Image (cartoon, grey):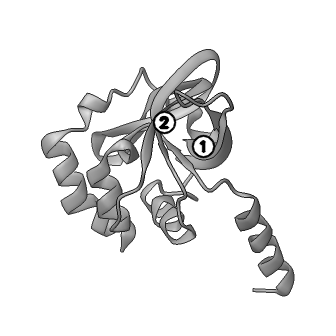
């Protein structure tokens, strides 16, 4: 990589939010622990002017995705002080670069805080927006679905 590329990467790292807004599978402590090997502080958060949908994936899987939608809100959790290494692991889980998801800087509300918190979020990739369906419900990803994801899918994604 060229020096200019190194500088551009450093600029991205220095300006990216240290926090991550999660609204789907990454709201689960067991998934975050399986991905990172650690437990993050997580607070309940709300993202205004976005809506949560289902995003079809191969194998008849449907995962959560968000897209801008004025007047809507998305409930989720804020992961505080995410390390660069763990963000890279989350990027692999969210399959950044495949078109399913892309990074966006958002501002979330947390109870007890007057000011919104700047965070990174995974939003639906532009090329996939036409495939969004309904609303993804967290209850769809509990018990056996989560265990299967941790056992069978995560090793492939994190490989």
Q: Which type of secondary structure does the marked residue at label 2 adopt?
A: strand
Q: In which quadrant is the C terminus drawn? A: bottom left
Q: Is residue 5 left or right of residue 118?
A: right
In the picture of the structure, the residue carrying the numbered disc 2 is: 65
> Residue 98: where, in percent of width, then height?
54, 56
User: Which residue is depicted at the point 48% across and 66% down?
Assistant: 86
Tell me: residue 111, above or below residue 119: above
Furthest-bottom residue in view? Answer: 2
Find residue 116 and name its label. Answer: none
> Residue 11: where, in percent of width, then height?
80, 67
Find residue 125 and name its label. Answer: 1
Q: Is residue 121 left or right of residue 60?
A: right
Q: Earlier in the sequence, mark 2 or mark 1?
A: 2
Return the residue nearer the eye: 44 or 69: 44
> Residue 152: where, in percent of width, then height?
21, 61
Tell me: residue 24, above or below residue 82: above
Furthest-right residue in view? Answer: 4
Q: Which-is-in-front pick, marks 2 and 1?
A: 2
The residue carrying pointer 2 sits among few (fewer than 14), some (14 to 19) or many (20 or more) residues within 10 Å by Cα, namely many
The residue carrying pointer 1 sits among few (fewer than 14), some (14 to 19) or many (20 or more) residues within 10 Å by Cα, namely some
User: Which residue is depicted at the point 25% across and 38% down?
Assistant: 141
Q: Which type of secondary structure does the marked residue at label 1 adopt?
A: loop
> Residue 62: where, in percent of width, then height?
35, 37
> Residue 28 falls in which quadrant of the image?
top left
The answer to the question of whether label 2 and label 1 lie on touching residues, with beta carbons closer than 8 A, is no
Furthest-top residue in view? Answer: 71
User: Which residue is depicted at the point 51% across and 26% down?
Assistant: 74
Q: In which quadrant is the N terminus drawn? A: bottom right
CA gap between label 2 and label 1 equals 9 Å
Tell me: residue 122, above or below residue 11: above
Tell me: residue 50, above or below residue 37: above
The mark tally for this picture is: 2
């Amino acid at each position: 990589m060229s020096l200019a590329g190194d500088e551009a990467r450093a600029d991205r790292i220095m300006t990216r939010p240290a926090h991550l807004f999660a609204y789907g599978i990454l709201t689960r402590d067991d998934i975050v622990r399986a991905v990172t090997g650690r437990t993050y502080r997580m607070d309940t958060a709300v993202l205004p002017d976005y809506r949560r949908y289902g995003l079809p994936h191969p194998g008849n899987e449907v995962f959560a995705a968000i897209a801008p939608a004025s007047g809507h809100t998305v409930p989720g959790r804020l992961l505080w002080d995410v390390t660069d290494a763990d963000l890279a692991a989350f990027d692999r889980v969210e399959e950044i670069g495949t078109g399913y998801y892309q990074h966006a800087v958002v501002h979330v509300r947390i109870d007890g805080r007057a000011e919104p918190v700047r965070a990174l979020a995974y939003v639906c990739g532009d090329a996939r927006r036409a495939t969004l369906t309904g609303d993804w419900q967290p209850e769809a990803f509990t018990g056996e679905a989560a265990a299967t994801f941790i056992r069978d899918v995560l090793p492939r994604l994190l490989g």
